[in-house]
Image: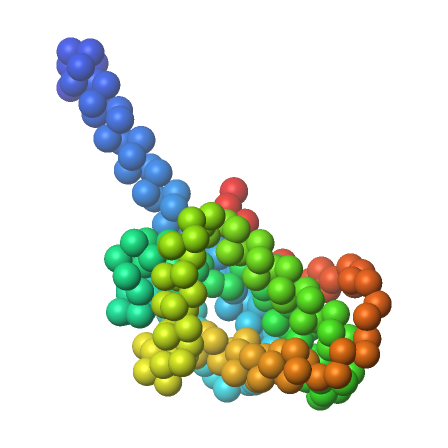
Amino acid sequence: MRTLLDADPATLTARLRARREELTREQESLVRADRAIALVEETLLHAPDDGMGLSRLADVIEARREAASMSRYFSDDAWEVAKHFYEDWPTANWIALYRDIAAAIPEGAGGAHAEYLLRRWNLLAQALWRDMTSDPGLSRKLHDGFRRAWRDREHWPEALKRRFADYRMNEVAAFLGSVSIAPLNRRAPLQVAPERDDSTRLASPR
């Protein structure tokens, strides 16, 4: 403290700025840890009792490092955008949708809520894409990268494969594909169905 009090204004300002930057990094780390815990809590409510709770926590904490390997599917400029998807996936809205789709899978593509779920998926996907980019060229690069990544998902890092498996993504994708080609005989307007408000609430940055 004496050193700071005796410092000239420029030195004091620089040291205070450095300390604020350090605090920001610490805060970001705490937010990531809080989110990791919330994701694992939600997952454990739906995952089988396989004793993998700690592994799931480690997977989420290591998400940023694991996600870096996905850059091989993207151009450099597209990866600057796409990496946030893999680092932060999934958000609360998507989790709620994945769980609702998984619950509807036994009903099949002709189930009462199938088309509603497909349209809900499309609306969320459109919103996600708008947040990513409005540039047509970059949009094409992102589409190509995500397509390549999904087709090669058997070769993803094990942590990412486990995270996607916890949300039954292969089954979800197959179900939505079946709904999209099913006879379009259900044309009721999209209505917002009541959302579960327990297991899908994730901690948000404080």
Q: Is residue 87 visible?
A: no
> How many numbered discs?
0
Display coloring: rainbow
Relative horizontal placement of residue 121, taking residue 83 as reference (left or right): right
Furthest toward the front, the residue is 136
Q: Position of residue 99 (x, y in %)?
A: 64, 73
Q: Position of residue 124 (x, y in %)?
A: 61, 60
Residue in the foreground of this view, choosing between 184 and 167: 184
**Which residue is depicted at the point 28% across and 61% down?**
75
**Which residue is depicted at the point 54% across and 59% down?**
91
Residue in the foreground of this view, choosing between 170 and 189: 189
Relative horizontal placement of residue 182, taking residue 52 as reference (left or right): right
Q: Position of residue 25 (x, y in %)?
A: 32, 43
Position of 187 relative to 205 (above/below) = below
**Which residue is depicted at the point 82% across and 63% down?**
189
- The part of the image, by quadrant, that contains residue 127 is bottom right
Pick the quarter of the image with the N terminus.
top left
Q: Position of residue 33 (x, y in %)?
A: 42, 56
Relative horizontal placement of residue 133, taking residue 114 as reference (left or right): left
**Which residue is depicted at the point 71% across and 84% down?**
182
Furthest toward the right, the residue is 188
Q: Is residue 186 visible?
A: yes
Position of 101 relative to 130 (above/below) = below
